[in-house]
């Protein structure tokens, strides 16, 4: 059993430019297609959608996870897992 491997990431920014009733409301949506490959060699595509606030939160969480992996305790555990 293994984790899927990252292959490719496509993203797009969708934004409604204007409507007749709402002139100054901006609600951008980010749309992602994440391509991965399983340990068995099967390609998978996942489609994700989020707004700016959730994307910013995801960035903060991923940066915290990367900085945690630089910890000597985590590196020691990662060595034993491999």
Image (spheres, grey):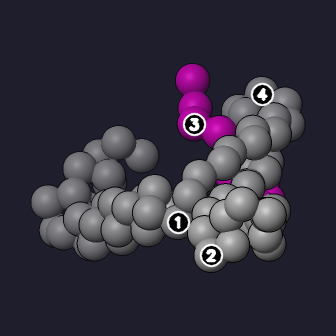
Residue matched to label 1: 52
Q: Earlier in the sequence, mark 3 or mark 4?
A: 3
Q: Earlier in the sequence, mark 2 or mark 1?
A: 2
Circle 2 or circle 1, nearest the eye:
2
Label 4: which secondary element? loop
Residue matched to label 4: 40
Q: As drawn, which residue projects farthest toward the left?
A: 73
Label 2: which secondary element? loop
Pick whichever, 70 or 81, lies toward us. Answer: 70
Mark 2 in CB contact with mark 1 (< 8 angstroms) = no
* Image quadrant containing the N terminus: top right
Residue 61 lies within the magenta run: no
Circle 2 or circle 3, nearest the eye:
2
Vertical placement of residue 71 versus 46, above or below: below
Image quarter of residue 70: bottom left
Pick whichever, 39 or 6, lies toward us. Answer: 6
Residue matched to label 2: 24
């Amino acid at each position: 059993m293994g984790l899927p491997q990252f292959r490719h990431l496509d993203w797009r920014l969708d934004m409604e430019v204007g409507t007749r009733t709402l002139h100054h409301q901006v609600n951008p949506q980010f749309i992602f297609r994440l391509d991965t490959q399983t340990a068995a060699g099967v390609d998978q595509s996942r489609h994700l959608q989020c707004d700016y606030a959730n994307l910013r939160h995801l960035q903060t969480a991923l940066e915290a996870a990367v900085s945690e992996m630089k910890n000597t305790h985590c590196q020691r555990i990662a060595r034993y897992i491999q």
